[in-house]
Image (cartoon, coloured by chain):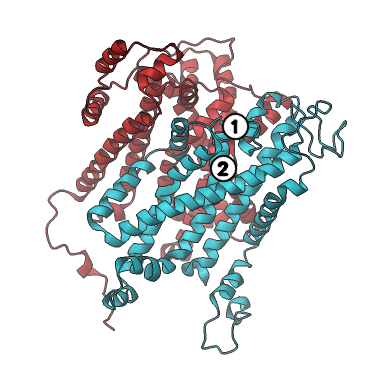
Amino acid sequence: MSMDVRAIPGGPADASRPPRPLVEFWYHFRRNKGAVAGLAVILIIATVAVLAPWIAPHDPLVQNRAAILQPPVWHDGGSWSYVLGTDDIGRDILSRVIHGARLSMLVGLIVVTLSLAVGLTLGMVSGFFGGVVDVAIMRLIDIMLAMPSLLLAVVVAAILGPGLFNAMLSVAIVVVPHYARLIRAAVLAEVSKDYVIASRVAGAGPLRLMLVTILPNCMAPLIVQATLGFSTAILDAAALGFLGLGAQPPTPEWGTMLASSLQFLQRAPWVVTWPGVAILVTVLAFNLLGDGLRDALDPKLKR
Amino acid sequence: MPPPPRCGAAAIRLPFPIPYPPMLRFLLTRAGLVVPTFLGITVLAFFLIRLVPGDPIEVRVGERGIAPERLAELRHAMGLDQPLWKQYADYLGNVLTGDFGVSLVTRNAVIDEFLSLFPATIELAAAAILFAVVVGLPAGVLAAVRRGSVVDHTVMGLSLTGYSMPIFWWGLLLILLFSVNLGWTPVSGRLDLLYYVEPETGFMLIDTLLAGDTDAFRSALRHLVLPAVVLGTIPLAVIARMTRSAMLEVLGEDYIRTARAKGLREKRVIGLHALRNALIPVVTVIGLQAGTLLGGAILTETIFSWPGIGKWLVESINRRDYPALQGGILLIATTVIAVNLLVDLLYGVLNPRIRHAR
């Protein structure tokens, strides 16, 4: 327990001044090895996603008739030119998985941004104004939460029509209630505190109170939820792709890749293995990071 | 600074007498909350389907085209020329009398199709949650008791992996291993074609037993194992994590220290005093898995060709059978609401703190 007593490294020598928030955050965060590993994996995947066209050994869409269902390099008949093997029309699986990282990160980013923007607005308004507005918004959210989220996403995607963008939209709609509830709870906890009342007395309008005074104090749960939101978004978008409601072939989206390789499950298991591994590793990394962030940002668990 | 408000006897005294016994009051209030939610779901189901691009009749007629007079006639017959609120009122009236529309493809009543397929999904979901509880509960308790040990880290690592699992891929891996490579379990369906069992209850395990056919029962069981494991994976992870944190919380309580101080054996302290109190939040979490199970059934049933409502919904989407889709989502959401209500009521019965709270 000597760790807890020791002064936080990087903090100023003068003990009367608190350490800078980022330094303090990193101090708590890095003690969680799983979270650090998750962060490292995410950084690697993000780099791969950005550099995909340059590091992928092949074009993800180019078919090679001479190398159909070729096994990975460590199997008999595998070759170094197709490290993870090829699919049923001779496309390089490694290149497709690498380009899939691009789509999955993009899906996560767009879904989280969209749902966060809408959820933040609804939750803020609901928590800040209360009354009829609050009741109306919360009823709507209860209704959405009564539907299994994947079912709702499937139905919305079916109505909007298949496609990657519609899949992102439906997943984003489905997760809005979670953000709205979270923000509302955080706002309710802050709104009657002295500093908010002081700001109100000083003449701050509702917009300033909401965005400048209250919002910064609600950031911790939001950051955690947004991180976990990446994993939900990637998982659900892949599930929609798998059901044929997401990205359409030949797009190298991980769920879509799994769906179109189903019939080769017995003959060429590697076609099925790698997209799934990619989904699992990415989702796991975001969940690890989210858990670590929660521990590091939640003041109740901090000490 | 004013002194902090004191909690204690003063806080419990109510300014007015409660007209009903607290338990009844709790049950009525909680049950009453379901009504607006249900109405909201009907609005959602009604308008979601209206969002489908194109006129429902023209969509149905497709490429063939239709004469304008005939179109107007059909629109009138289906009530599509009525104002929207009237259409919704009619829809709600139909739903409340058990009329959920007619499937475009099979021409059967949606409610009949749903009810004939629902037992298969319930059987699968029940087996999945059984698997999740039987494995997850002891795993969570073990992790909490051995906090910080290798066992704890393993259980938590595995459960986070399970929680992150794309179950459609997990199902394929298990099929590859157990069905294709080892040949232990069948790849799809509920029963070998060799057997025929008269559907009495719709639950294959019960029907085969009623028919007294043990071979068929074994076949049904072998068909059930893999899909149940796949569908139960995420609930298993959730239950293990929840049990662990609930146990950790309870193990720090004074009454546990008292039980130990009395000289009770550790097994009794953990198994009786701690677990019973830790179970309260765990039961709620188990109940909340109803939504996860019905959502996950869409993927699991598609992979294993399990003839339940999940597979039926996906097929309805692919066939553009919108009445079936509309009825299906309404019925599934109603089921989830009902299960959540039951769990909440059960929670109130189990936990006196909730029962007596205002």
A29 or B284, nearer to the observer: A29
Residue B288 locus on image (x, y percent) = 42, 43
Q: Name the tint of chain A in the rendering.
A: cyan
| Mark found first going from the N terminus, 1 or 2 | 2
Using the image, name the chain to which the residue with label 2 belongs.
Answer: A
Left or right placement of residue B329 versus residue B30 in this view:
right
* Chain B colour in the picture: red
Q: Is residue A65 visible?
A: yes
Residues flagged by tags 1 and 2 on a common chain: yes
Whether residue B134 is visible: no
For disc 1, the marked residue is A248
Residue found at x 53% / y 49%: A110
Residue B39 at what x, y percent from top left? Answer: 26, 36
Say which of marks 1 and 2 sits in front: 1
Image position, residue B81 (x, y; %): 24, 22
The kind of residue tagged 2 is Leu
